Image (spheres, helix red, strand yellow):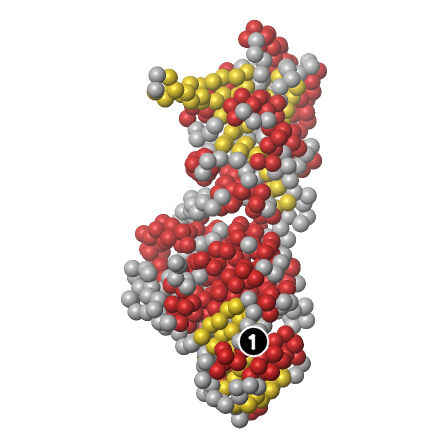
Amino acid sequence: MEVDYIDEILKGKLVCPEPEGDGKPLSVPTKSVVIEDTLDGMEADLVSDLGFGEKLAVVYDLNTKEALGGRVERALDSIAKVVSVELPGRPHADMETAEKLAKETESADALIAVGSGTINDLCKFTSACVKKPYAVFGTAPSMNGYTSVNASITVNGLKKSLPACAAMGVFLDLTVLAAAPRRMILSGLGDSLCSSTARADWLLSHLLFSSKYRSEPFLILDRDEKILLEEPEALMAGDLSVMRHLARTLVLSGFGMTICEGSYPASQGEHLIGHYVEMLGSQERPESFHGEQIGVTTLTMARLQEMLLQQEKLHVVPSTRGKNDLIDHFGPDLGIACWEEFSKKRLTSGAAEKLNEKLEREWDSIRERISKVKVSYFTLLDVLRRAGAPTTPEDLHWPKSLYYDAVRYAREIRNRYTFLDLAADGGVFEKPDFLERNLKCAAGSALKMKSLEQFPLRKLREVEYVLADIDDTLTKDGYLPATAYTALERLKAAGLKVVLITGRSAGWCDHIARMWPVDGVVGENGALYFHMRKFERDGEKHEKLMKRFFEKNEEERKRKRDSLGKIWKQIRDEVPRAKLASDQDYRVADLGVDFCEDVFPPLEEAEINRIISIFEEHGALAKLSSIHVNGWFGEQDKLKMTRILFKEVFEENLEEIRDRVIFVGDSPNDAPMFEFFPSAVGVANVRNWGDRLECEPVWITTKESSDGFGELAEALLAAKGHIPKTTL
Ligand SMILES: [Zn+2]
């Protein structure tokens, strides 16, 4: 049987399984954690096992009294003298309320909290102040503070994390938790998801500055967290077995913080962004729960971390932010408090030099290590979407400009070095439009095309075939970056079938089909496909290039080529700056006219239009790619040839399996493919075509050309459970 981490920790039996652990069992002050479908009838026994004494103060507010407080109070009546403390209205976890609570519970031997965030914080803080034990009956799975030893208390208007008592007993009735307001459940989910980004941040700080780091808090979460990532719908539908995993995650996350003597494993950059907005945002906007906010900020951190991990080189510069800048930014009191924190990690020129040496030597191994432990942005986004949780700052009614400031400056409020610091020190935020382009406050909202991030994960998982255009989809500035080639390789290695669809010549296709990691290539806009056929003869494996032409008759192909020759003469006369495509000698079926590959400056729109009409006057078809006008005689097009390829190579009817195929392209000649495939994707540069695009793809990537292709590949691989590779 699998060991139960909660039980093992309570018994003091769990030793860190990692080699770097110190061999000592993990220990926490909590004595008892009971999580059951229902605790109805068990309340008195649970509390009397703790040996709290004869007089118990039961603390609740109006809502939690209704949810569970009344029941707990009645049950405890049989074992102790109960002092009932109902906090009026909507209580706040602040110093004044805590002082009042201490007075009202003065005669009691112990506190029994019935509630979640606020009530739990008040009770754990008060019991630490008055040195009395406390236990908690949770009413919502909204936060991870049941088992932690800090409480979030407002002191003179400033939210602080203060030392508090750990609950001796944590009792979670899953039926009660599942009946909690929906947004409180979303909050617990959001606050749980951040363990991935917090881990990446914490590990970064450890690898860069040798600060303390422990992996146990994450190892103990693994199993429960995995189910949360898989079953957000069931959680929200009230499935108690999934609710149990959320409850366990929250308990174990609190244990993780206790073990590490600090919130390191559950609060890093994502919490800093949230705290910044809380501190500097207007109090007017509609309230949102802590964990709802953390869900959104976690997505931002995940994206930022992935972007930085993709950088092959990073170079930091000394910080130019001084004490006065912080006072200007945060105001006098907060500014000085922030400076005390920030000045400890602020990069001086000496520190920047040292860090650069480190990055120079170790960045590759650092990013590899961090990439291995983080959950992909797409997975996190998908989980929150499926649960119906907020995913953008707008969802929380946070203004965009406030949010961008939060991402840039939140690092200044606490002395923890996170990816927010690495981004700022690396000058990433200085790039024009960086936040606008990469944080996507309103992802794709102005466009008909939907951001690829919104692609449902389940549909991505079903994809078996990837069809991709080459020019300006795989290539960038006319060359094939490793990003794109690696993406092809990895897609193929993951078992996906990859076919390239291009206007390029038969000569190119011969090379591509033979040497690239693809299953075939449709070339010359559908005039042909080439495919390396594998076969066995006399027990030996062979491969042979199979060439299939749309026009099967070779004589006929030659006759059409001659007619295209006449068309070229006319184009050359009328549009003198037009050039024959450099690969024309290697073409079998079409005529490529270059308007911008080797032609500089590129032809004017009127010239391009004239080329197209000359083709059409001769009864030929003409299509515009990003670099050529291609014309040909015949019925072929990319889609028709792709159908033939699917039938002959994969023995599949393309019509029937459309949902399992993704096409990705960038230009007007891809329009028929965009139209045909319900999951067509455009790389971001597809936007440049504006009206010339007859049909838009449904989805659009954030990045352009090869990087956009890499982004799509990464999403596909992540959906299929492959760990992202940093070079993507
Ligand atoms: Zn939190």
Q: Residue at x 46, y 25 (%)?
A: 512
216 left or right of 182 in image: left
Q: Residue at x 49, y 21 (%)?
A: 530
Of the 4 image quadrants, the one containing the C terminus is top left
Q: Residue at x 60, y 86 (%)?
A: 85
Q: How many numbered marks does the figure carry?
A: 1
x%, y% of residue 270?
51, 62
- Quadrant of residue 398 within the rendered picture: bottom right
Residue 279 lies, with reference to residue 545, above or below; the image says below
Of the 4 image quadrants, the one containing the N terminus is bottom left
x%, y% of residue 50?
45, 81
Q: Residue at x 43, y 70 (%)?
A: 255
> Could you say which is closer to the camera, residue 385 or residue 349?
385
Residue most toward the top? 555
Report if residue 344 is visible in the image.
no
Report if residue 46 is visible in the image.
yes
The residue labelled by disc 1 is 41
Structural crowding at the residue carrying mark 1, measured as other residues with C-alpha within 10 Å and reported as few (<14), some (14–19) or many (≥20)? few
Amino acid type shown at disc 1:
Gly
- Quadrant of residue 102 within the rendered picture: bottom right
Q: Secondary structure at mark 1?
A: loop
- Quadrant of residue 15 within the rendered picture: bottom left
Residue 381 lies, with reference to residue 616, above or below; the image says below
